Image: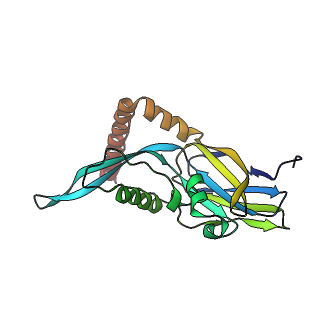
């Protein structure tokens, strides 16, 4: 730790490689503080544009009648802390740094008058939690010997690719005394990445190839069954 630094942190891996058969991964964050305080870690995935559709009853059926858009939602969001957030800082600081799901700023746009912004926000968070990409539980930051700390960050199998930011805060007496941001890249590698890139760049051709292969596989299976 250099003179004047109150906080230093790093990751066990700065590249999370998604290969065929990827079933999730854990990344270790570790560091040290020069002065006593609380350590809070926020992991944010790449920003993505989300559409939330609202079902309404129409002609006896439930159909998607209205929708709202959230252009700045993080694809992934997790928080870890050395103590409960309400004991670490006041809501104003948590709002300012967007620490915790209750304090995550999400701007709702193009919503129908019948949709409340708070309901749209809550719906997005529920969907993200159901897919394992947002966590309402606060992870544990553990101190070792008073100055060293560590926490493990779990990434599920469906973690989106892109550039992530890992924000680490040293909070003293309810204020941020020091902060550090470390990048983390989640990227597809190997054959799976090549297939994904091909599908994105040549969607029509990829669909044709997929249908052809599926038809060929079905024909071969039928032929083998007839011989049997």
Q: Residue furthest right?
A: 3
Residue 36 in which image quadrant: bottom right
Where residue 45 sits: x, y (%)?
A: 56, 48
Q: Is 221 situated above or below 216?
A: below
Which residue is drawn at the image coordinates 40% and 60% (left, top)? 122
Where residue 13 sits: x, y (%)?
A: 71, 48
Which residue is drawn at the image coordinates 70% and 67% (left, top)? 82
Judging depth in this view, the residue of 103 and 185 nearest the camera is 103
Residue 142 in which image quadrant: bottom right
Task: Tell whether 44 sits left or right of 110.
Answer: right
Where residue 84 sits: x, y (%)?
A: 63, 70
Q: Quadrant of the C terminus?
A: bottom left
Can residue 143 be seen in this snapshot?
yes
Judging depth in this view, the residue of 128 and 90 nearest the camera is 90
Tag count: 0
Which residue is drawn at the image coordinates 78% and 66% (left, top)? 143
Which residue is drawn at the image coordinates 63% and 46% (left, top)? 165
Q: Residue furthest left?
A: 59
Q: Is 208 situated above or below 143?
A: above
Q: Is 146 situated above or below 78?
A: below
Where residue 27 sits: x, y (%)?
A: 68, 55
């Amino acid at each position: 730790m250099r003179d004047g630094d109150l906080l230093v942190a790093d990751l066990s891996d700065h590249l999370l490689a998604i290969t065929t058969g990827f079933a999730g991964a854990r990344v270790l964050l570790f560091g040290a503080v020069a002065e006593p305080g609380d350590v809070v870690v926020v992991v944010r995935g790449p920003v993505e544009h989300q559409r939330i559709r609202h079902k309404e009853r129409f002609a006896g059926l439930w159909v998607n009648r209205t929708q709202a858009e959230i252009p700045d939602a993080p694809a992934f969001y997790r928080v870890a802390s050395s103590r409960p957030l309400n004991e670490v800082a006041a809501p104003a600081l948590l709002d300012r740094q967007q620490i915790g799901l209750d304090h995550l700023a999400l701007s709702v746009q193009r919503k129908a008058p019948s949709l409340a912004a708070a309901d749209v926000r809550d719906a997005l968070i529920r969907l993200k939690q159901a897919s394992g990409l947002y966590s309402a539980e606060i992870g544990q930051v553990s101190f070792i010997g008073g100055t060293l700390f560590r926490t493990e960050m779990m990434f599920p199998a469906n973690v989106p690719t892109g550039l992530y930011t890992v924000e680490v805060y040293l909070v003293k007496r309810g204020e941020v005394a020091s902060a550090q941001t470390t990048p983390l890249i989640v990227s597809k590698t190997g054959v799976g990445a090549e297939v994904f890139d091909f599908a994105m760049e040549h969607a029509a051709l990829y669909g044709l190839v997929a249908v052809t292969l599926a038809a060929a596989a079905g024909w071969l299976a039928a032929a083998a069954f007839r011989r049997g």
